[in-house]
Amino acid sequence: MPSLPRAQTFDSLSLRYGEGFKWLVLLVVGLGTIAGVLSTTSFSVAVPALTRHFGLGQDQVQWAITGFMAAMTVAMLPTPWLLDRLGFRRLFLLAIAALTLTSIAGSFADSFALVVGARILQGAAAGMLQPLGTLAVMRLFPAATQGRASGLLGFGIVLAPAVAPALGGLLLDHFGWQAIFLINLPFCIAAAVLGLYLLPLPRKQEHRQFDWLGLSLLSVATLALVEGVASLQHSGPGAPWTWFSCALGLSTIAYFIHHARNTKSPIISLGLFRHRTFTMGTIVSFSYGFGLYASTYLIPVFLQNALGFTATAAGLALLPSGIALAITIPFAGHLADRHSPQWITAAGLALFGLSFLLFAILGGGTTYAELVAVTIIGRLGLGLILPALSLATLRHLEPHHLGQSSMVISYMRQIGGVLGIAIAAVFVEWRESVYGTLPPGIFTAYQQSFLLIAIVFLAALIASFKMKSS
């Protein structure tokens, strides 16, 4: 019986593979990150099928997505501490194993409660993976090639959402919504096998005290804010539960700030926010996550519910933008090594926001060619943002801050995504209740939803201008 490969040190693996070793590590981490991203983005195409199968509304079904996102967000918080305790190799392999097992379990779910449960566990596993890619780029690569490395990593991260609707729609139409859980399995297996061979043992493991109170406070705040947004639909804006959820979220955040100021090793150090570039970068990351995940939710649902596309046709309509994305990402990575990542980020935000403004203008009157063209514009912007945003935010920080700062950027992007999906689902449901679910009313509902996303990207664009140019 073959034995598992023996883990080796970074120095011995570097000696064996030479200068190419850091690129092999990036490949392993990229495969794991893609597996997590596929789990996030592929599920949106299954929303109409789930509403029909379980007889639920969009505002209820979106909890399968927001539950995943909330768990993903919360699971990011202990990542710097787990890195210190377990090391990069063990944490990565643990997260991949958990993602694999929960994905398989989700495919056997026979009730919506089990679907949500599987998605929450899946999200927690994906959350541990999320900050590791940026951390690998910043630690392994010199400044002159960080843009290229980030571009290659971003190629997989952003290509996954572009391909996921087409692949997910194909699986859904032929095998049912259960198959959506298995879309990431090949990447999980490849990442696990390669990780066993290529990820090195940690050089030194620290054992600092973990901020359990900080984790609890931020977890409560995350869940309370998401429930506050969701309850706008099921309880109404004037309901006591809505006010209680929002008040609990905001008060918990305020208490965490007090706690972080008086704790030796808080889970998020407030000192990071003394750097204007980092502070503005977190605002951009939040807005970017809001718009990205809200749009990933809205577009497939719009194509199916408003324009009448099948799941497969909706996915294929988005496929040409994936080709544009594939061309943009490596180019954007090279640009980030030669020009200011701040201005590349701003250009990407402008393009991405413009695409949703066009969706809002065109509405139900869009032709197939216009639909494809608008999605291509958005993906071009997305391709510019991802390689440059992390570099623009983190490049000015000291090396010992990279672990926590990478987590904070990922956390802010994901909390933006959690709220983005929740708000998008509630907002479109609210506008449908006003304008109806038949043309032309349903077109107006989605037009206003796309306009909301465009406004969020305008806010992110303003914040990007406040970042320090490099």
Image (tube, grey):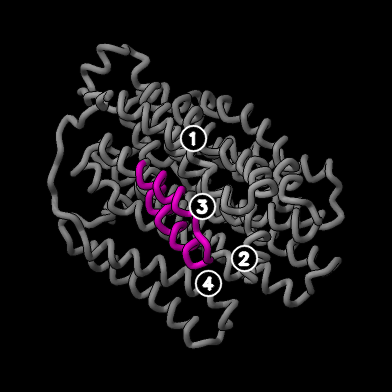
Nearer the N terminus, badge 4 or badge 1? 1
Is disc 3 placed on a helix, strand or loop?
helix
First in sequence, mark 3 or 2: give its number.
3
Q: Which amino acid, mark 1?
A: Pro
Task: Check whether the beta carbons of the residues at disc 1 and disc 3 lie within 8 A of each other.
Answer: no
Which numbered dot is residue 107?
3
Image coordinates of residue 174 in percent, x first then y, are 68, 46
For label 4, the SS is helix
Q: Amino acid at mark 2?
A: Ala
Q: Residues within 10 Å of mark 3 (few under 14, many from 20)?
A: some
Q: Nearer the viewer, residue 277 or 192?
A: 192
**Is residue 66 left or right of 90 when viewed as pictured?**
right
Picture quadrant where residue 384 is located: top right
Are the residues tagged 4 and 3 within 8 Å (C-beta)? no
Q: Quadrant of residue 246?
A: bottom left
Q: Is residue 210 visible?
A: yes
Q: Note whether residue 409 is visible.
A: no
Question: Is 236 drawn above or below residue 341 in the view shown?
Answer: below
- In the image, the segment drawn in magenta is 97-126
The residue wearing badge 2 is 425
